[in-house]
Image: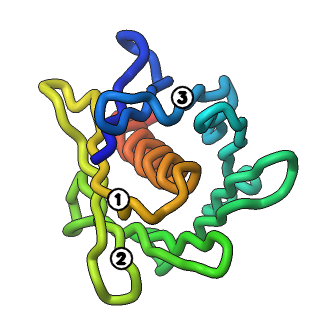
Amino acid sequence: MLTAERKRLLSRDFSLLEDGETIADVAFSSWRDRATLDVRGTSYEARRERWLSGVYVLEHDGIEVARAEPQGFWRRSYEIRYGHSTVTLRRKGWTGRAFAVFDGDSEVGSVTRAGFFRTRAVADLPAGLDAAVRAFIVWLAVVRWQHDQAAASGG
């Protein structure tokens, strides 16, 4: 079980903890939809591929590690490809604030918001998934929640 904890009040940056140990630090850029993921001492860049694109990528030293492509008109789910594998990050329900992770037709994990002000995220992702890919999935869920929040506030 992974827990994403904000580093400071009102900050978007967070640490990803597993069994009380930090496995990744996520530092959002001042540019929208960009972050640096420091996963166990290795630096990755997570970003939107192009300004109006719905595609997100995770790179290490300019080499693509994972790619999340929207599926469907409303972009309610993302197919995440990494190596020779694929999982799908899909919203639970039409207005749901939680995501389910699927391997084919089987649900294998989830990412949900937790805490009184919903400032934490809890991810139950397959342990066999690379730590950088797990951090990317949590980051993508947080980015999508931020988009929802901006849309709801009219900005």
Seen at 27% across and 43% down, the residue is 122
Q: Earlier in the sequence, mark 2 or mark 3?
A: 3
Q: Position of residue 127 (x, y in %)?
A: 39, 59
Q: Callout 1: 10 Å neighbours few (<14), some, many (20+)? A: many
Which amino acid type is marked by label 1?
A: Leu
Which amino acid type is marked by label 3?
A: Asp
CA–CA distance in space, label 2 to label 3: 25 Å
Q: Earlier in the sequence, mark 2 or mark 1?
A: 2
Label number found at residue 125: 1
Q: Residue furthest bottom?
A: 105
Which amino acid type is marked by label 2?
A: Phe
Note whether 91 is above or below 72 in the view shown: above
Label number found at residue 25: 3
* 155 sits to left or right of 56: left
Q: Position of residue 34 (x, y in %)?
A: 66, 38
Name the residue that disc number 2 marks.
102
Seen at 40% across and 11% down, the residue is 8
Label 2 sits on a secondary structure element that is strand
CA–CA distance in space, label 2 to label 1: 10 Å
